[in-house]
Image: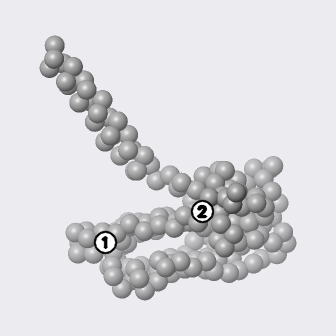
Amino acid sequence: MYFKDGILIGIKFAILFFIIPFFIACSGVNPLSSGAWVEEKNRIPVLQDGQQEGSWETRDLAIKYELRQEANTIYISGVVDFGEYIGKGFSTLETLTVYIHALKDNGIVLETKPVKTFGYRRQLDLMGTMSFKGQFDMSADTAVVAVAFSYSGTVMEGGGRTSWEFWKIPRRKPPA
């Protein structure tokens, strides 16, 4: 009887502390979901008419983009370049996913969509240009005034013996 109770407690413990966190970590969900707030310095205003271009840079990488909004569709294309921090310290890109976030005028996220995933254990010096192109349809009641980028990825060195996860989620708590 005590043995059965011990096994049940062990199974519950494993599910609670190992299995559930494992599935959450592996889900690939970007934590900058609807309702999150993006700090002002990471907001990219969207022009109502015409093409715009620019860049968004972090310690890890730079995203050079072209952006156009027509009605409720955002057209985006661009290139991702790694900075020296990643390019000099690691040789293999395990994976990199870039996200775009549609924002309201107060910086609140309306929708989040993946732009592109790069990598799959590719040598950084052989990858060439990491370009992306997409169109993102927003719901009819969405008034997008700005966008923001975020990313998450993993690089490796030494055949996978050393790996480093990197990410940027441009959020902070909203001012009180």
Q: Position of residue 104 (x, y in %)?
A: 76, 58
- x 40%, y 50%: residue: 25
N-term mark: 1 or 2: 1
Q: Position of residue 15 (x, y in %)?
A: 32, 35
Instruction: Decide if residue 176 is on the left or right side of residue 32.
Output: right
- x 29%, y 33%: residue: 13
- x 77%, y 70%: residue: 46
**Residue assigned mark 2:** 171
SS at badge 1: strand
Q: Position of residue 110 (x, y in %)?
A: 70, 53
Q: Look at label 2 and name its amino acid.
A: Arg
Q: Look at label 1 and name its amino acid.
A: Met
Q: CA distance from mark 1 to mark 2?
A: 27 Å
In the rendered image, the residue lying farthest to the front is 176
* Mark linked to residue 156: 1
Is residue 4 visible to the viewer in this orientation of the structure? yes
- x 64%, y 77%: residue: 65
